Amino acid sequence: MERAYEKYNAEDFLQDSFFLQWMKGEEQAAEFWTHWLKNHPEKRAEVEKARTLFAGLTFEEPEIPQSTREELWGKIATQTVDKGGRYRLHKRSRWMQIAGYAAMIVLLITAAVYFWPNTQMEYETRMAEIEEYKLPDRSKVVMNSNSFLSYHQTDSFRNISFKGEGFFNVKEGKAFRVESNTGIVTVLGTSFNIYDRQDKYEVICVSGKVKVAIKGNGEFILTKGEYVRQSSSGEVEPNDDSPDTLTLDAELAWRNGEFFYKDTRLESVLNEVERQFDVDIHLKEDLKDISGAFYFKNDELDEAMQNILWPLRLTYTRENGDIYIKK
Amino acid sequence: MKEIRDQNLWHQLQNGNALAFRQLYDKHINALMGYGYKFTDNKQVIEDCCQELFIKIWEKRRELPYMDKPAKYLYSAFRNNLVKTLQRTENRYVAGVREELFELTPAADRNIIDSESAEIRKSQLQKAISSLPARQKEALYLKYQKGMEYDEICEIMEISYQSVRNLVSRALTKLRGLIGVGLAFILKIIPHL
């Protein structure tokens, strides 16, 4: 943290973001600067000037009357949200649910067969962990919580077994394969995101070209921004030649602890919350199939829950560390 | 009740949630209008620009990109529209050169109980600040009043990163010079370190 602060004058201090944190009253910054000033008494005058200037840099803001805001909102609303076309929640049909359970059982059996005797290198992220690992060929992988990666040391390093969610940035070279429960991704040098959990299998191509073979469902070639997804009921998307491109920034935001969902089941989102915060969430049957758009960040549980449940107007309680979702 | 984050409001809005749209409006309308009043006193123009902004957001919600800082977009789109409108409607040209306006009034200092010295101080500061060029004032406003980072300010003002830094540092140097001379005496009443 110690920079060339001894040489700073008042203007320099005022352009330093850490100094401004102190001015805004942040505790950590205050602690540092009080201590620093004790060691640099010769800078007191300059710092005093900066503080004085900072205090002078607050300006008057007009009062906007409530009536003005309401009136203006009225004008906006009549031309937007009140024109028709309302936000609606989707419900899944019953048979889709049953198909989902069936697929889950199949996946569980596959998972049981999956474990090999241990002559391999392993990386694992636990609940509430997101980690970046470097592979021997200098390819990189960012692994989301509760994910597992392994490769045989004797094999080429570029044959990976994988579970969970990961973002791969692959160094160019010979074929790089990532095999998970549901499919196999093959690339030469590129970056992609893979998600293989109970609720879906999804591969997003972030750069270059990716080949995805979904077990029992054919092969797909993806280029930048394209994805292939298989739901727990076995439906594959896109199912025609017009692959939807995704908003990559939003899809990859999980690496910074931010999660965006579109048209996703509440249950899937809450499963991710369980992984991110290492917490148990109880959701009643009749709420499991609600789906919609969701967002949360993995730094504070209460805030995350609030952000997820807010659009559905649901609430929750915490009992013995567990979370119960309520209407 | 925890706050619903801007990113979430934006994300919900993009997915057609009217409630999120309303909440985004409520959260930012005061600040946007306040920003507008620094450019002009014309209430009608400010309200029209806000109205256009929010209608556009709703209409284009599917095409607009994902945003980690929706507020930055609100400020920049609003400013862009406002400045254009003002150029069109008010004749802001003096001898062929565009005259820029950005008016700032220093807030009264609550730390000073003596109203007379508060008045002197305010008028001194007022004088110093109003002598700065409009763009320097705007940069100071966004940086210190709004607490924005340089990279946000440069997108809002549509100038380079280095230009923003220059604007801020020139303005500070000038104000500091004033403090060095007459103001230091009046401003002494700041709480002690």
Image (cartoon, coloured by chain):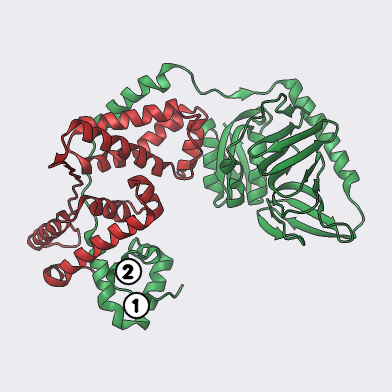
User: Real-space Cα distance between discs 1 and 2?
Assistant: 9 Å
| Residues at marks 1 and 2 on the same chain | yes
> Residue A19 vs residue A236: left or right?
left
Q: Are marks 1 and 2 in contact (CB under 8 Å)?
A: yes
Disc 2, SS? helix
Decide which of tag 1 and tag 2 comes sooner along the chain: 1
Residue B87, position as x, y percentages in the image: 22, 35
The residue sitting at the left extreme is B116
Chain hosting mark 2: A
> Residue B144 vs residue A172: left or right?
left
Between residue B150 and residue B22, name the one nearer to us: B150
Colour-to-chain, red:
B
Asked if residue B63 shows in the view, the reply is: yes
| Residue drawn at x 74%, y 31% as measured from the top left | A231
Q: Which shade is chain A?
A: green
* Residue hosting label 1: A7
Asked if residue B192 shows in the view, the reply is: no
> Residue A244 vs residue B128: left or right?
right
Q: The disc labelled 2 sits on which kind of residue?
A: Asp
Disc 1, SS? helix
Residue B61 image label: none
Residue B65, position as x, y percentages in the image: 50, 37
* Residue hosting label 2: A12
Chain hosting mark 1: A
Between residue A287 and residue A180, name the one nearer to us: A180
